[in-house]
Image (cartoon, rainbow, N blue to C red):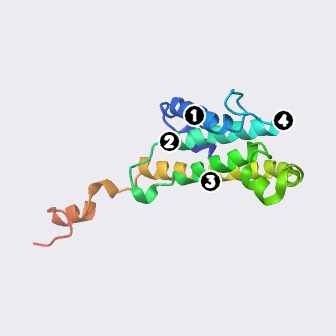
Amino acid sequence: MVGALRSLPAATWPRAVLYAAGAAVLIGVPSDLIDTPIFGRPVETRPIDYVILAITSALIGLVFAIRVPANPALDDDVRPIWGGFVSFLAVGCPVCNQVVVGLIGTSGALSWWAPVQPVVGLLAIGLVVVALKRRLATYQLDACPLPGAESGVGGQAGNDLASPSGGASR
């Protein structure tokens, strides 16, 4: 995968930085990892929250920066979005998540959900890594078509048979 990333065009990397910054803002502001007056967080952030935010944002940026052909059959942009959502759950305040608090209460959110959040973060990273691998495979298929694919129907074999030195007898 590292070799495939190295072979990406230079224009991919500035796009990746912009997309990663966007993902970091979309995940970090509502979870209050990026401090703003809009959102508050009653539970302190942990260093692992910032690590998960940085890794998932960088990976999401790479996935969206790699351009692939406009083919609906190859459209897999849903995986990094799910990875971003799961990352948000992993770095968010455990008692601010109304679904978790509604299901297991505030004490359950602190005693059960908070310790599980780093594992959820690993799941988010895994989702985005799978999306990146698929995107790289799709990019490589588009960049390196199969031999003869550009010659169209009939290809080289049809031209050999029609030539005087080809397989056609007179």
Question: Residue 1 or 77: which is nearer the viewer?
Answer: 77
Callout 2 environment at 10 Å: few (<14), some (14 to 19), or many (20+)? Answer: many
The percent coordinates of residue 7 (x first, y second) are 53, 39
User: Tag 4 or tag 3, which sits nearer the N-term?
Assistant: 4
The percent coordinates of residue 16 (x first, y second) are 55, 34
**Secondary structure under badge 2?**
loop
User: Which residue is painted at 51% across and 32% down in the image?
Assistant: 15
User: Which residue is painted at 39% across and 54% down in the image?
Assistant: 71
Give the residue pinned by disc 2.
66
Q: CA distance from mark 2 to mark 4?
A: 35 Å
Give the residue pinned by disc 1.
22
In contact (CB < 8 Å): disc 1 and disc 2 = no
The three-letter code of the residue at mark 3 reads Val
Q: CA distance from mark 4 to mark 1?
A: 23 Å
User: Which residue is painted at 64% across and 38% down in the image?
Assistant: 57
In contact (CB < 8 Å): disc 3 and disc 4 = no
Q: CA distance from mark 2 to mark 3?
A: 14 Å
Give the residue pinned by disc 4.
44
Mark whose residue sits in front, 1 or 2: 1
Give the residue pinned by disc 3.
130
User: Tag 3 or tag 1, which sits nearer the N-term?
Assistant: 1
What is the quadrant of residue 147 in the picture? Answer: bottom left
User: Tag 3 or tag 2, which sits nearer the N-term?
Assistant: 2
Checking the image for residue 45, the label placed there is none
The three-letter code of the residue at mark 1 reads Gly
The three-letter code of the residue at mark 4 reads Glu
- Side of 160 relative to 43 (left or right): left
Q: CA distance from mark 1 to mark 3?
A: 20 Å
